[in-house]
């Protein structure tokens, strides 16, 4: 179309050079944080906190401030309990019983909560019908579901899963709903001009745009799953169910073994934190970083 | 119109327009009942033509462009376009979960380009906007000007014959904007696209267009049209551009002044 006479070519070259210069000047340089910085800013502070707690704990016992071992065992006693359980090979069993239950329940909650959340977010009638109930359920402590679940389903694994689902599904669905609500209308309009309407729009535009909110919902959903599972395990222990962390805690109480109670509480805490640190936080950070939403502090 | 028809024949197309806007009105439900935003707009864009739509802020330019893009329906009148137009916004509207290259590939995928061809075509389009190295870059890693160029490449990927642009350079600094004007003119001449470009900036309108259409405000009507015969490539500081801009600015000011008189 354009006649490529000499002035135009020269003009073109000038433009390319100018443009390259502008691009170079304006491009932001991103670099990885060096390990040293990560170490001093992310690892040292929590380790210091844990060490301090252990020191205070040991001091309480050593200086006889709390001198009844059935109320407060020493850190050494609890460690001994860990070692025993490890040597008997039961430690990993306890953990695996609960974690496998929790993760399986969570996956089921994911499979139910995701389509449910999409329906509530995208279909006006469904939103008006069950939206408020769904967000109300989120604030209901899921322990409340344990007694009815026991009556309906009996003391078995189904009852555990039911309690997990009732705790986690609302969080996951609500997370997705708020993720979808926060999708900038501009993206939807851009998608529509490109032909992404209906299901194609949901798949290519709405879902990926809502991903950060969805992930936040998943994270909360896991926390709720784990909590409700522990409540269910503590309340509904029976021999056929095997010994998970909740039952371990309950067994400790029944045998008045405070160090076993402490062991169980520690394990529940550590597993909850570990799943978050190993699965959800890296996932969330990856998503946010790839979108330039994670500001380095 | 004669030149427009000649161009259509030139391009070998059978349609004699890229967009035809006939007696289009649009009103919105406002606090004081129906608010008439666009009133009886009639406007054609010929194949290969570059038209700028000029008007004060709030006169209904974006509304009209949305109607042409099919994002909204007119209250009255008809709009026909030669295929689905591509639309570029003031904000880049690139998807932050995709790289620059994948943004373009999504547009290709949605219009049905086979998977095997997408990567190559995306690279070509990036080369067209002179961003060869940007394929794997994330949106937040690009400068404002680069984002708009990727957005332009993505719009071009739709392979529409009509490109709608809603103040796409308004948020850029002056130097970058000048460069993008040159790029847009070059790409328009290379591709033979029709462009309907909205702006409130008179010089920008004159710098780019073959035809400038001035909209009045409240309600938006076609107030006047100018044919711009200054040869391309133009520069925004050319004397001829400045002279016509002065004339159009006078007219635009007159339009705006009318609203202060009662
Ligand atoms: N969806 C809408 N609902 C109600 N009023 C609207 C809507 N969109 C635009 N308007 C009104 O129409 C007028 C023109 O808006 P717009 O087309 O965005 O102007 P421009 O792009 O020329 O600045 C404004 O007064 C605006 O308030
Ligand atoms: Mg506008």
Image (cartoon, coloured by chain):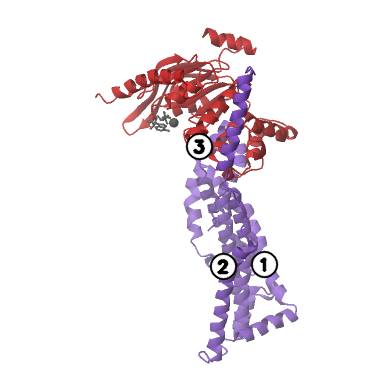
Chain colours: A purple, B red
Other residues around mark 2 within 10 Å, as few (<14) / some (14–19) / many (≥20): many
Q: Position of residue B214 (x, y in %)?
A: 41, 20
Seen in the picture, residue B243 relative to A151 is either above or below; the reply is above
Q: Is residue B89 left or right of residue B106?
A: left
Seen in the picture, residue A145 relative to A258 is either above or below; the reply is above
Whether the residue under disc 1 has CB within 8 Å of ligand 1? no
Ligand 2 positioned in quadrant: top left
Which residue is disc 1 drawn over?
A: A99
Q: Nearer the viewer, residue B171 or A192?
A: B171
Q: CA distance from mark 1 to mark 2?
A: 19 Å
Image marks 3 and 1: residues in contact by CB distance under 8 Å: no
Q: Is residue A292 visible?
A: yes
Which residue is disc 2 drawn over?
A: A146
Which residue is disc 3 drawn over?
A: B91
Which callout, 1 or 2, points at the residue further toward the start of the chain?
1
Q: Is residue A228 visible?
A: no
């Amino acid at each position: 179309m354009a006649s490529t006479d000499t002035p135009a070519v020269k003009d073109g070259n000038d433009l390319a050079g100018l443009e390259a210069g502008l691009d170079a000047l304006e491009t932001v340089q991103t670099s990885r944080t060096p390990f040293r910085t990560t170490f001093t800013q992310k690892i040292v502070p929590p380790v210091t906190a844990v060490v301090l707690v252990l020191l205070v704990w040991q001091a309480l016992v050593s200086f006889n401030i709390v001198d009844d071992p059935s109320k407060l065992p020493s850190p050494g006693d609890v460690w001994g309990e860990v070692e025993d359980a490890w040597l008997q090979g039961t430690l990993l069993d306890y953990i695996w019983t609960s974690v496998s239950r929790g993760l399986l329940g969570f996956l089921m909650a994911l499979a139910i909560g995701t389509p449910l959340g999409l329906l509530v977010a995208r279909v006006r009638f469904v939103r008006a019908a069950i939206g408020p109930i769904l967000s109300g359920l989120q604030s209901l402590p899921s322990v409340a579901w344990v007694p009815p679940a026991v009556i309906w389903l009996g003391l078995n694994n189904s009852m555990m899963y039911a309690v997990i689902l009732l705790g986690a599904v609302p969080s996951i669905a609500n997370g997705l709903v708020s993720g979808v609500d926060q999708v900038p209308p501009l993206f939807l309009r851009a998608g529509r001009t490109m032909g992404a309407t209906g299901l194609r729009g949901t798949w290519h535009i709405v879902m990926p745009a809502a991903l950060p909110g969805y992930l936040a919902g998943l994270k909360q959903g896991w926390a709720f799953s784990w909590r409700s599972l522990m409540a269910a395990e503590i309340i509904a222990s029976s021999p056929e169910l095997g010994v998970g962390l909740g039952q371990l805690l309950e067994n400790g109480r029944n045998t008045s073994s405070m160090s076993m109670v402490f062991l169980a509480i520690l394990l529940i805490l550590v597993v909850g934190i570990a799943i978050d640190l190993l699965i959800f936080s890296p996932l969330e950070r990856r998503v946010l970083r790839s979108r330039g939403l994670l500001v380095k502090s | 119109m004669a030149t427009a028809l000649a161009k259509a024949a030139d391009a070998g197309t059978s349609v004699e327009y890229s967009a035809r806007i006939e007696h289009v009105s649009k009103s919105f439900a406002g606090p004081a009942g129906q608010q008439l935003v666009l009133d009886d707009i009639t406007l054609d864009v010929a194949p290969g033509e570059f038209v700028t739509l000029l008007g004060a802020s709030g006169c209904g330019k974006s509304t009209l462009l949305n109607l042409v893009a099919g994002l909204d329906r007119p209250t009255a009148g008809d709009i026909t376009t030669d295929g689905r137009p591509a639309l570029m916004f003031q904000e880049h509207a690139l998807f932050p979960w995709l790289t620059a290259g994948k943004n373009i590939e999504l547009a290709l995928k949605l219009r049905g380009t086979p998977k095997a061809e997408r990567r190559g075509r995306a690279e070509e389009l990036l080369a067209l906007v002179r961003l060869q190295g940007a394929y794997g870059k994330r949106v937040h890693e690009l400068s404002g000007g680069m984002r708009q160029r990727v957005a332009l490449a993505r719009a071009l990927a739709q392979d529409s014959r009509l490109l709608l642009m809603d103040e796409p350079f308004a948020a850029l600094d002056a130097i970058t904007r000048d460069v993008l004007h040159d790029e847009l003119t070059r790409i328009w001449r290379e591709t033979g696209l029709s462009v309907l470009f909205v702006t409130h900036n008179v010089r920008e309108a004159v710098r780019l267009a073959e035809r400038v259409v001035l909209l009045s405000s409240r309600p938006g009507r076609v107030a006047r049209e100018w044919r711009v015969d200054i040869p391309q490539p133009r520069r925004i500081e050319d004397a001829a551009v400045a002279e016509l801009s002065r004339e159009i600015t006078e007219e635009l000011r007159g339009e705006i002044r009318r609203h202060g008189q009662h």
